[in-house]
Image (spheres, helix red, strand yellow):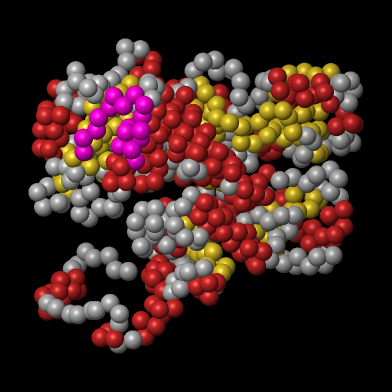
Amino acid sequence: MFNTKILFFTSNPAGHISINYGKEYREVKEGISASEKNDYSIEVMLATKPIDIQKAILDFKPNIVHFSGHGEEGGGLVLEDELGNPKSISARALGQLFDLVSEQVNCVVLNSCYSTDQILHIGKYVDHVIGMGDEISDEASIKFSVGFYDALVKGNTVEDSFKFGKTAIAIYGLEEESVPILFNKESDSNSSRYDSAQIEFSKKRIITIGFTYDSPMFYYGENDKIMGFGYELARKLAQELKKSVKPKVINYSNVQDKLLSGEIDLAVGGFIPGDKYGNKLDFSKEYLKANFCLVVRKSSNYKTIEDVNGLSVGVYNEPYVKEWCEKYLPKSKITAYSYPNWFECLEKGEIDAIVNDYPYASISLKNHQDLKITNYHLSYSDVGYAICLPKDKKVTEAVNSALDRVLGDRYFMRYIHNKYIEFIENDSSHLVDKFKSIEYKHVYVTKKNDNIHKLAEKFLRDRDQWASIYNLNRHILPNPWVMEEGLPIYIPDSQADIDKSFMRMAIEHARNGMNRNDGGPFGAVIVKNGEIVGSGNNMVTSINDPTAHAEVVAIRDACKRLGTFQLDDCVIYTSCEPCPMCIGAIYWARPNRVVYGCDRFNAASIGFDDDFIYKEIAKDRDARKIPMSQILGEEAKIVFDEWSKKMDKLEY
């Protein structure tokens, strides 16, 4: 006699990406059959229509209801009508149904994209509801189901089985382990609140991220464009979470109020993990070690940390700064201050120097013209910056999982480090002599600042050279750079070297997609004004879309982000010469230029031979391998005539 019954619904209506529910069902059933306990039974219903769900639940009386199919961002499940066409059932209606059978059904599994609304409605009545907070690939959803049921039939709780399901996604090298969500209908209000918080977070397509105004974490560039290491990191993080970013400037002092009120979802700045905010806020993994700098009066002769050892030194009132100073300034008198009082004390001569995180010091000196930074890079502390967010274990796990992928993208991290963070080492003076012999074509400076521009001009004039001076905000900042009077001037690589940097990112997308078995080994990135605005890799086999080539995926991503259907002023970097289909898409997108790695003959050597398409294009219609015939041309032309007369059309 079976103690637990599983009712397995599937739906794959016309017009939607095909789902391999057959494989999911077979693998789940095989796992159940192989179980030694064997007290589970499973019944499947294919091509589910709305009325089938209620009838099957009443007839079979299941304890677990599993749905494999499509979800809608608006909150419904996509089933089928009598003709196999899409027919949605709302989240509210699902909640009403499971209210009626809640004494019998104790677990619902919604293995479909965008099922957060269904979770919230069904979770009012059923003990455990599992769903997907975002899009999820066929492969990841199957791995989750198999891992979940394999653990469940071996006697594990729903909560632990859910963890096994997520772990199965990670074990296979897939990056969607944060997509599944578990909601428990418990009497513990705190647990329910946290589950709801994670679901609400996963539902959001746009997240508001608060930025503290401390360069290079965040600052305004030309035309009030938001710039900074923290901003680009946050955008990349949101991309991994499949969300867009709405930036909001906040003060360091009110971050807790902003987060707890829901005004912002995450905060990025100089936040150091610790107990400063008690039990109300949480922190992600560290994404950047704090680098210290030495601030002194311009009238002083202090240059190194050794020069101020034994003098009076002010620090920000944080334990990690004081610990660093006690280690490297054992003879000094260390005084802790609150922001920004220590700068005023230094100006007045009450202290001799300040040790502080570079981001804070660099932005603060704008208001203290008599002070200067002597060493941009003293040493790293034992702690670093982290993302601040409301205390919720599951949201933190999702953020950390996405952050791991961001930090693991070595080309991206190298790019933003070179652009905003990398400062010259104290022992790198030999680079200055090396660069004195270079003929400078362009010079990049750190901020839009007349004094720095004048310094750059002087730097060139002293060497009898002429060059265009660019603001960092609009260009990729290359490496290396030289120092002149304590301020950085950036020496750019050639355009060819800049192209190589972005091409390596495209190649990395190709490698990552290949390792995830998304499709063929192809990747692409799209760049506008030195900023990546779109990226993608081949997804043909993973989403069953023959048009999902890397270039097409990247074009779709860029157009969505830019809110346009044309990629003016953009450059497409693709790891391989585009195929005929992608060439067509590229010409319709109208970028400025295309840069590719491998050519079509390299692709042909590993089985991706597009030569037959080139030959087909040149043939007469009647001679092509796939028959093409024309019918109802006059009827079809009527629509064209209507288009010609349409007054509100958007031409392209």
Residue 586 belongs to magenta span: no
User: In the displayed structure, would residue 384 be above or below residue 421?
Assistant: above
**Residue sitting nearer the eye, 509 or 437:** 509
Left or right: 634 with respect to 532?
left
- Asked if residue 375 shows in the view, the reply is yes
In the displayed structure image, the side of residue 320 where residue 515 appears, left or right: left
- The residue shown at (81%, 51%) is 484
Residue at the top extreme of this rendering:
187
Q: Which residue is more in the foreground, 141 or 620?
A: 141
Total residue callouts: 0
Residue 379: where, in percent of width, then height? 78, 34
Residue 269 in the image: state x and y as whole percent.
58, 33
Question: Is residue 73 visible in this depiction of the protein?
Answer: no
Tell which of 546 and 652 is nearer to you: 546
Residue plotted at (42% across, 69% down): 582
Q: Which residues are magenta?
A: 27-44
Instruction: Report which quarter residue 421 is drawn in.
Output: top right
Q: Position of residue 260 (x, y in %)?
A: 44, 22
Asked if residue 481 is positioned above or below residue 609 in the image, the reply reads: above
Image quadrant where one finds the C terminus: bottom left
The quarter holding residue 439 reads: bottom right
Residue at the spot 80% in from the left edge and 65% down from the top edge? 438
Compared with 550, 241 (above or below) is: above
Reply yes or no: does residue 30 show up in magenta: yes
Name the side, left or right, on which 233 lies relative to 68.
Answer: right
Find residue 263 and report its image quarter: top left
Q: Position of residue 256 (x, y in %)?
A: 50, 22
- Residue found at x 12% / y 37%: 52
On screen, 515 above or below 523?
A: above
Which quarter shows the N terminus? top left
